[in-house]
Amino acid sequence: MSSTELPSVPPTSVLPEPAAVRVAEGERLRSVRVPGVTLTVRSRPPAREGRPPAFYVHGLGGSSLNWSPLMALLEDAVDSEAVDLPGFGDSPPPDDGDYSITAHARAVIRCLEASDRGPVHLFGNSLGGAVATRVASVRSDLVRTLTLVSPALPELRVQRSAVPTGLLAVPGVAPLFTRLTREWTAEQRVRGVMNLCYGDPSRVAPEGFRHAVQEMERRQRLPYFWDAMARSARGLVSSYMLGGQHGLWRQAERVLAPTLLVYGGRDQLVGFRMAQRAARHFRGSRLVTLPDAGHVAMMEYPETVASAFRELLRDATGPADEGDTVQPDAEGDPGPSADTGGPTATIKTTRG
């Protein structure tokens, strides 16, 4: 093996049985086998029959658990399913070891096709936002609306605080980081992640922190944990290099679905300045800015995000809203993983 290669991952059939993942009350887990990959899907049946389907895609290092607070708030509006991307959450690595944005998008498309639930209200956060953008661009028949929370789209001027995450894509960095941090406890790792991803980490309740530590401990026992992280980071960075019709910004321009964009003012991974550029590229989009939120607004302020989505849903299924600016309920409820309190949110609808 050359110094530029990552350690090989054992076939799915010989991987150790991972510890059980947490399933919130009202949720279910199921396994979906599609060509090339096995996916774990977390679902939350709607409070009423006949609700339209929604599908959620998490970010780098995350899992379907990231969407539990929002799914609970939307159970009266949509029939929710959240996927664990290959190598994350409870999903094993892909058979071919491909963690590119294209491969992740292909897995999502095949999962949607297998379930025959489309078109869906598609959600994506961070890396999942890039994946969802590609899915909506190439398979408009599968996407009814698109909601992106801090999507990881190409930036020419990357924030300094995002550089360490990007370095995971550099060959050899992941194994080196593993060796340098072998003495770190799961609690220390979780605090580091929360400091990076949350606008105000102190809002996370003790129960939410405890659950996050348990999930970190589970993941660290998986032999492919850092491999999946590094390869996915590399896949994301590689997607930034693509031009022409395969470029993510060009694909954003081809999205036909009504789009909701959510950006946090304290996001350390995706620049807040990217919000306006995204609003220009996604035609007819509406932009929600949350000055106090970080990278995972759907976890910090799920009630505010849910309110904005309900307006998108209303306008996508009913008479078009003629107003350019609306003020949603700004009292964010972070759900079971954080304390109460919320940001001031502004939604602007752009015409394109």
Image: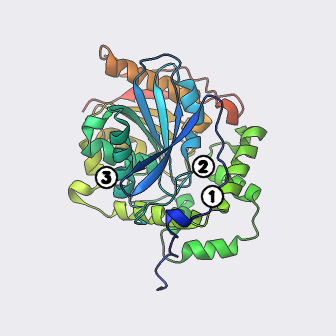
Please state which of the two labelled residues, at mark 2 or mark 1, is closer to the viewer. Answer: 1
Q: Position of residue 274 (x, y in %)?
A: 41, 47
Taking depth in this image into account, of 227 and 291 the one nearest to the observer is 227
Say which element carries label 3: helix
| Disc on the earlier residue, 1 or 3 | 1
Q: Crowding near pointer 2: few (<14 within 10 Å), some, many (20+)?
A: many
**Which amino acid type is shown beneath numbered disc 3?**
Leu
- What residue did someone put label 1 on? 17
**What percent of the width, then of the height, locates residue 199?**
62, 43
* Residue 166 visible within the image: no
Label 1 amino acid?
Glu
In x, y percent, where is residue 182? 72, 71
Q: Are marks 3 and 2 in contact (CB under 8 Å)?
A: no
323 sits to left or right of 328:
left
- Label 2: which secondary element: helix
Tell me which label, 3 or 2, sits earlier in the chain.
2
38 or 179: which is nearer to us? 38
Horizontal arrangement in the rendering, residue 287 relative to residue 301 (left or right): left
Task: Give the quarter of the image for residue 259.
Answer: top left
Badge 1: residue crowd in 10 Å (few <14, some 14–19, many ≥20): few
Q: Secondary structure at mark 1?
A: loop
Disc 1 vs disc 3: which is toward the camera? 1
Q: Residue at x 30, y 39 (%)?
A: 282
Residue annotated with mark 3 = 248
Furthest residue to the bottom? Answer: 2
Q: Position of residue 100 (x, y in %)?
A: 39, 61
Tag 1 near tag 3, CB within 8 Å:
no
Q: Which mark is residue 197?
A: 2
Mark 2 or 1, nearer chain start: 1
